[in-house]
Amino acid sequence: MDFNTIAQRKPLYRVGDELMGYLERQGRLVPMEVNYAELKRFDGLMPHLDVHGKPTLWNSVLYRPGEREELYDRLVETYQTLIADGRQIGHLQVAGVDFCAYGNSQPFRIKILNRINDNHDYFYIKISDSSRVYGLELEHLLSPNRISYLVDGPTLVEEHIIGVPGDSFIVAPQLYGGQLNEVRLSKEFVKFNERCFVRLLGDMRAYNFVVDVIHDLDQVQYRIRSIDFDQQSHEGRARIYLPQFYKENLAYVQLAQRVIGAETAEQYRNEERALLRRRYKHSERVVEELLAVLEKDHISTAEQARELGEDLGKLHGTRAFAGLTNMGQVLRAQLSTCLQS
C-alpha cells in the first residue's frame, strides 16, 4: 500500500456561518461583480495549448458575443476589487478566460491585459470550499507570503501566485534564472517541507507548488510557494503533510540529500520553526480566532482526525493529540507542539 496516496477526491465543504463571520471581520467577505455560476454559462470550450502546441488541462472558454462584453467589463471590476479595493485602474481589459475541470475547485483563470504596455496578470474564480479558505488564511498568517483572496458566498476569487511549477523547474532549472544554486534550493525545500507539516497542508506534490526565483546580487534565492490549498487538515496520515515523501518530489529530496546532508537539514528545520514561531506570535490573536472557528467546523471526518492525531502523537512522542476528533483541535495541538519555545 502507498501510504502517500490520497485515496479519493476530497469533497467540497460549504463555507459555514462561523467562517463567514471570521472572513467578514478580516475584510475578506466582499460582494463580487461576477459569481462562479455565471461563468459556467459558457457557449463552448476550445483546448488551450502550451507554447509547444500541446494540450493542457485548461480549455479556453467561449461566450456569446452579446453577453461577452458586459461580462468582461464585470470581470475587470472584480479584478480591481481584488487588487485595488475597487479603485479604478485604467486601460484594463480581459484578454481571455480559461476553465479547468480537473481538481475540486474547477477554476476559471482570467487573463487581464493592460492596453498601455501589454503587461498582463491573471486571477482565478473558483467554487468556495472551506478547506481551501482555511488553507489560504493559514498561508497568509503563517508563511512568508501574503495572499490576496476574497469570498462572496459560493464564489472564491484568488490572486495569481507567480512562479515556475515545481515539476517543470526541477527538470531544467537553468531556463529560469541561470545556473542553479543547489544549496539554496535545497535549503528552501527543507523549509517549505517544514512549513507544510507544521500547519498541516497536504498534497504538496511538485505540480502543486511553484518556485519563485529571486536574484540577489551575484546569486539567486528561491522561494517555494503553495498554489493548491484544498488539502488543508483533511487526510488522516501524517506523511500526507510532508512533501518529502511524495514520489513527484523525489528530485528535490535527492538533491538535498546530496548537497546539504541530515545535520544541515535539521538546522534549517529549526530555523523555519523559529520563523513560524515569530509569525504565530505576531498574528496570535487572529490565528487563535481562526482555530476557534475551525474547531466548530468540519473539513474532514472524526475518524480521519482521530487517525491523524494518533499518527502525530506517535511521531512527536506526546499524548497531546489523544482523543481528538476534530481537525481544528488537531491543528491547534500540532501548532502548540511544534512551536513551543
Image (cartoon, grey):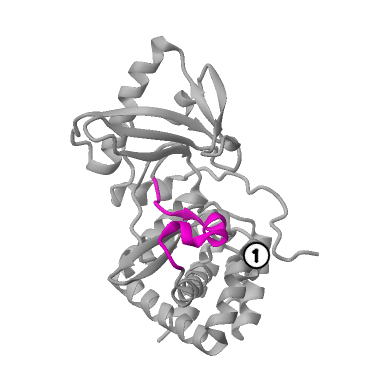
Q: Would residue 33 be visible to someone looking at this image? A: no
Q: Nearer the viewer, residue 247 or 309?
A: 247
Could you say where residue 61 lies in the image, as x and y percent from the top left?
50, 25
- Horizontal placement of 103 versus 145: left or right? right
Which of these two is toward me, 136 or 255?
255
Q: Residue furthest bottom?
A: 263
Q: Which residues are magenta?
A: 160-179
Residue 139 pos. (x, y %) = 41, 60
Q: Which picture quadrant has residue 55?
A: top right
Q: Residue at x 68, y 68 (%)?
A: 307
Magenta span contains residue 161: yes
Q: Amino acid at mark 1?
A: Tyr
To which residue does mark 1 refer?
A: 246
Position of residue 86 relative to residue 326, above or below, is above
User: Hey, which residue is sitting farthest top in the picture?
Assistant: 66
- Taking 40 as reference, is 251 left or right? right
Q: Nearer the viewer, residue 276 or 307?
A: 276
Residue farthest to the right? Answer: 1
Give the answer, above or below, for where 38 lies relative to 147.
above
Q: Position of residue 82 (x, y in %)?
A: 30, 41
Q: Residue at x 40, y 87 (%)?
A: 341
Q: Kindly state the secondary structure of the residue where label 1 is placed.
A: loop
- Name the residue at 45% across, 82% down: 268
